[in-house]
Amino acid sequence: MIQTIGVIGAGTMGSGIAQVFAQAGFSVLLHDVAQPALDRGRGVIDRSLAKFVEKAKITAADREAALGRLRLTMDLGAMAEADYVVEAAIERVDVKRALFQELDRVTRPEVMLTSNTSSISITTLAAATRRPERVLGMHFMNPVPLMALVEVIRGQATSAESMAVATGLCERLGKTAVEAADYPGFIANRILMPMINEAVFAVMEGVGTPEAIDTVMKLGMNHPMGPLTLADFIGLDVCLAILEVLHDGLGDPKYRPCPLLRRMVAAGQLGRKSGRGFYQY
């Protein structure tokens, strides 16, 4: 019986994942290596729930109940209590592999270990554990409390039973699970990132301004936001990292990151989070 969810990483994605599980009635253990990150994560969750109350999507009592189900910890050993774990740490394979190795040690053998990675191989992460059949990807979309999709990624050794458990949890969260195979970028980023990259090439080559490119995609293709606005929202460093995974993993020059994207990341122009990307914030 899954009652306690462990969430690793209290950043934007981790705090959103913790929130949706807490709202759905699960006890949540939110872990990060730094107390300020945990405090920020709790603040983000608090404000997000407050907005739901303002919009009458939940009651004030629901908000308090969800916050009451949330516990913060800097001790990874606390994951011994977890019945199911979702990792949402930094998008670096070395960090994630080390985490999975340690989670394999501290959690009960039957506990499933899942990753919110947007592009890193689930098979590679599973190989760091002694339970590869219980390792899979759960790629939530940002912002997690609002977006209905979860990509559920089957690694080379993931069992059908594990996939069924993850899909059932998505349903309990009110999310739609879509299965993807363990190829670089899975489905969402395999399609999205080349579009964003092509939009950056169009800026670099003077085909159009960021505003013009985004307006074409919004009004011409009915996208809710343009690719460059979306890139700023995701973080240009994150876009670059995913494109590098696609380029390295698939070996196809069509995934080569645009030089302008590399230059902007090197300059610290990362989008919304740094105050400047293709737009000023």
Image (cartoon, rainbow, N blue to C red):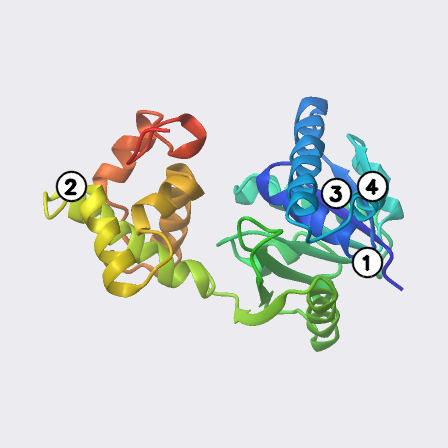
Residue tagged 4: 64
- CA gap between label 1 and label 4 equals 28 Å
Q: Are marks 2 and 3 in contact (CB under 8 Å)?
A: no
Residue tagged 1: 111
- CA gap between label 2 and label 3 equals 43 Å
Residue tagged 2: 204
Q: Earlier in the sequence, mark 1 or mark 3?
A: 3
Query: Which residue sits at x=57%, y=72%?
Result: 179
Query: Which residue sits at x=66%, y=69%?
Result: 158
Q: Residue 80 at x, y = what percent? A: 87, 45
Q: Residue furthest top?
A: 36
Image depth: mark 2 or mark 1 in front: 2
Residue tagged 3: 102
For the residue labelled by badge 2, is the local secondary structure a helix, a strand or a loop? helix
Nearest the camera: 100 or 87? 87
Image depth: mark 3 or mark 4 in front: 4
Up/down of 71 relative to 170, above or below: above
Kind of residue indicated by mark 1:
Val
Nearest the camera: 197 or 119? 197
Q: Residue furthest bottom?
A: 160
